[in-house]
Image: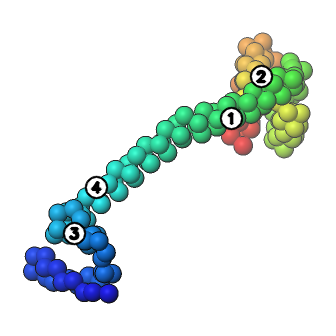
Amino acid sequence: MRTQRHRSGTSDRVVLAAPLQDGARSPDRQHNGNGRAADADDQCSLHDVQATELGELVATIEGEVIPRLMLAHQSLQDSASIAALSVAPPSSEDVAELVDMVLVDNDALARGFVNKVLDRGVPIESVYLNLLSPAARHLGELWEADRCSFSDVTIGIWHLHRLMHE
């Protein structure tokens, strides 16, 4: 084992090196003899390798992983859509029943009815569009036909609004 002393700038550094055979040069002097260029070249080549590997990783993620996730997610959505289509949306009888519940000012009964509809597997969007919205419309029709008062409609709409936000 031999010791080599290198001077770089203002400081000295000591490098331990094994004896070399057949006139081979020390690894730290292979490029241009001062050690710095070898380090810079090594860093550049390491950076190039890392950039290449990162590029390959990004390409794999974009080309393989993301498309497979999209397909898996799409098939789950399709399954949920098919299941939702197999469940009957709320009927006009459901709407009339809910209107009767909100007109008698029974919030708990109306909430239980909506939960029962949801438990049948009806999606929340369908409850909004096919139950709560027609119920509000039906309340307006009852008022126009003078079958309930303005305050009854107001309180009924208030109950529907609360159901929508729960």
Spatial separation of the CA atoms under disc 2 and disc 4: 65 Å
Spatial separation of the CA atoms under disc 2 and disc 1: 27 Å
Quadrant placement of the C terminus: top right
Quadrant placement of the N terminus: bottom left
Relative vertical location of residue 37 with respect to residue 82 in this rendering, above or below: below
Q: Nearer the viewer, residue 38 or 149?
A: 38
Residue 35 percent coordinates (x, y): 20, 69
Q: Name the residue: 21% across, 69% down.
A: 29
Amino acid carrying label 3: it is Arg
Residue 15 percent coordinates (x, y): 26, 82
Left or right of 58? Residue 81 is right
Amino acid carrying label 2: it is Asn
Q: Mark 2 or mark 1, which is nearer to you?
A: 1
Disc 3 vs disc 1: Cβ atoms closer than 8 Å? no
Amino acid carrying label 1: it is His
Q: Name the residue: 75% across, 15% down.
A: 141
Q: Name the residue: 73% across, 30% down.
A: 75
Residue 136 percent coordinates (x, y): 73, 24
